[in-house]
Image (tube, rainbow, N blue to C red):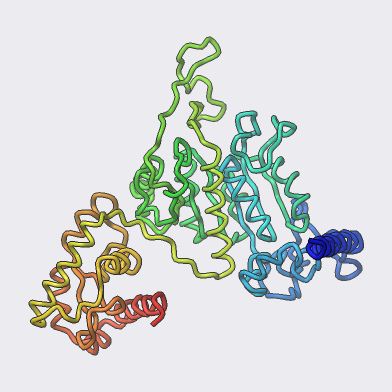
């Protein structure tokens, strides 16, 4: 017992000494890189608080004038490096440097946007533009990332900037109290941001922003409806063509296609969960139901209340930040495919494979997969679609119907029907595939050959072959 007490005392003493050393280091080291600069190397800021173009000349990292904070290489600051230690351990130094050198725009700073912006900041993003026309209200506090009662009544953009300055003061933050529209597009989207986060809950504004990002060639991630939901396990990231069970994404998808000819190519965060509660009726000061449009501060923006469990928009924002940070770092993450099939579908595909093997080879002895492995092949490798058609055209019931036309066949007929040698094709495509050799495919369809080979190689790595 005495030995145990001695060990605990030593551990406690070590922890105390470590804390004292850290506090001493913080007091000795400069608070931000910008304060370290002096003389000919002083950092110059423009009228908006951004680093001027002249300051980025002779950048230590790259020649790109848009880099802003890149020239400072934030990780060279000892405090910043220590604060981002866990990120550096995860990504590696060079990948984390890409994050700290990046510029991200977040539009909409409510329950989703505030959490997304907060984690981008804490992940070391070097420059943020925060945009929202609205103010913090008491009802915002059940889901906002940093707002307190003292912040009620002040613009959300300024609220975030105030709190962010004490979390990561080296981040270059610009807060704009602005409504995104055609007149503010240039002001908000100029400067070649590395990513734009759409956290707007108004359909017209959201569609206009997404179309502008596509037109400008900007990477954008959009959040769909986080209100009226309660199950965090249903949240997904996928192309907007694959988003299901979400009225907001359905409306946005329709308008993008109809008004701008945009079919897809925009990643969205959405929930597969159907809304649990409905939009509440609007009641005016008298307590009677009234016309919501009579109370709109901004035309076209809703005033009726969507019931929100505060945890869900927060998780939406965290998902967005995680997606963007890994993208900025160049860290490969395979998002879970949106394939809504039941076990009977996978059993059917397994049985079709057995029957096809018996018909073609006279035996099913070389079928080396079970139903669970078929599920992995269909869902994880081919995302519920033919290997020849990877566009997300069929979602929901459409995907359910399309699976009735699919079957698994060997990629290389000389090898057994194993997990790393099966591809998903439509019946007609499967018949044509059996007439070709791999050399034929390599010569006549090199792009298809390389894509399939890459997917099957991933299967080998996943199962440790």
Query: In terms of image quadrants, where is residue 458?
Result: bottom left
The single residue placed furthest to the front in the displayed view is: 1
Q: Is residue 31 left or right of residue 152?
A: right
Q: Nearer the viewer, residue 233 or 137?
A: 233
Q: Position of residue 105 (x, y in %)?
A: 60, 53
Q: Is residue 48 left or right of residue 287?
A: right
Q: Nearer the viewer, residue 402 or 66?
A: 402
Q: How many marks?
A: 0
Q: Is residue 151 above or below residue 175?
A: above
Q: Is residue 462 above or below residue 297?
A: below
| Residue at 70%, 75% in the rendered image | 61
Task: Report if residue 15 is visible in the image.
Answer: no
Q: Is residue 258 left or right of residue 73?
A: left
Task: Report if residue 241 is visible in the image.
Answer: yes
The single residue placed furthest to the top in the displayed view is: 286
Q: Nearer the viewer, residue 51 or 7?
A: 7
| Residue at 47%, 22% in the rendered image | 292
Q: Position of residue 226 (x, y in %)?
A: 48, 41
Query: In terms of image quadrants, where is residue 128?
Result: bottom right
Quadrant for the C terminus, please: bottom left
| Residue at 37%, 54% in the rendered image | 262
Q: Position of residue 145 (x, y in %)?
A: 64, 43
Q: Is residue 58 above or below residue 291?
A: below
Quadrant for the N terminus, please: bottom right
Q: Position of residue 135 (x, y in %)?
A: 65, 33
| Residue at 24%, 80% in the rendered image | 411
């Amino acid at each position: 017992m005495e030995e145990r007490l001695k060990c605990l005392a030593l551990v406690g003493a070590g922890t105390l000494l470590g804390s004292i050393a850290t506090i001493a280091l913080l007091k000795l080291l400069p608070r931000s890189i910008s304060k370290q600069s002096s003389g000919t190397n002083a950092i110059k800021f423009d009228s908006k608080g951004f680093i001027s173009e002249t300051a980025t000349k002779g950048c230590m990292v790259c020649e790109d004038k848009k880099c802003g904070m890149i020239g400072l290489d934030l990780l060279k600051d000892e405090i910043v490096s220590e604060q981002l230690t866990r990120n550096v351990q995860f990504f590696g130094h060079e990948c984390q440097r890409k994050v700290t050198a990046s510029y991200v725009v977040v539009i909409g700073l409510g329950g989703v946007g505030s959490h997304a912006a907060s984690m981008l900041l804490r992940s070391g993003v070097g420059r943020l533009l925060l945009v929202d026309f609205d103010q913090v209200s008491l009802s915002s506090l059940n889901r906002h990332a940093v707002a307190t009662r003292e912040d009620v009544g002040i613009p959300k953009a300024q609220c975030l900037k105030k709190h962010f300055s004490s979390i990561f003061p080296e981040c270059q933050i610009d807060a704009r109290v602005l409504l995104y529209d055609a007149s503010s597009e240039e002001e908000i989207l100029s400067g070649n941001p590395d990513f734009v986060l759409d956290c707007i809950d108004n359909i017209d504004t959201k569609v206009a922003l997404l179309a502008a990002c596509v037109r400008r060639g900007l990477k954008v991630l959009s959040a769909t409806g986080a209100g009226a939901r309660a199950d965090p396990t249903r949240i997904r990231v996928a192309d907007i063509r694959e988003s299901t069970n979400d009225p907001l994404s359905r409306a946005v998808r329709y308008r993008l296609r109809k008004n701008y000819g945009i079919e897809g190519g925009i990643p969205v965060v959405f929930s597969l969960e159907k809304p649990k509660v409905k939009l509440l009726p609007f009641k005016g000061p008298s307590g009677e139901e009234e016309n919501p449009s009579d109370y709109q501060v901004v035309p076209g923006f809703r005033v009726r209340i969507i019931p929100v469990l505060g945890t869900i928009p927060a998780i939406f924002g965290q998902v967005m930040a995680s997606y963007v940070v890994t993208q900025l770092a160049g860290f490969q993450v395979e998002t879970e495919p949106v394939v809504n099939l039941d076990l009977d579908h996978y059993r059917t595909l397994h049985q079709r494979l057995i029957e096809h093997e018996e018909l073609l080879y006279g035996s099913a002895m070389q079928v080396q997969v079970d139903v669970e492995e078929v599920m992995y092949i269909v869902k994880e490798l081919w995302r519920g679609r033919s290997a020849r058609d990877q566009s997300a055209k069929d979602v929901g019931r459409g995907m359910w119907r399309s699976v009735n036309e699919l079957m698994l066949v060997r990629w290389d007929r000389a090898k057994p029907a194993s997990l790393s040698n099966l591809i998903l094709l439509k019946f007609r495509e499967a018949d044509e595939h059996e007439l070709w050799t791999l050399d034929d495919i390599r010569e006549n369809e090199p792009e298809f050959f390389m894509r399939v080979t890459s997917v099957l190689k991933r299967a080998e790595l996943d199962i440790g072959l």
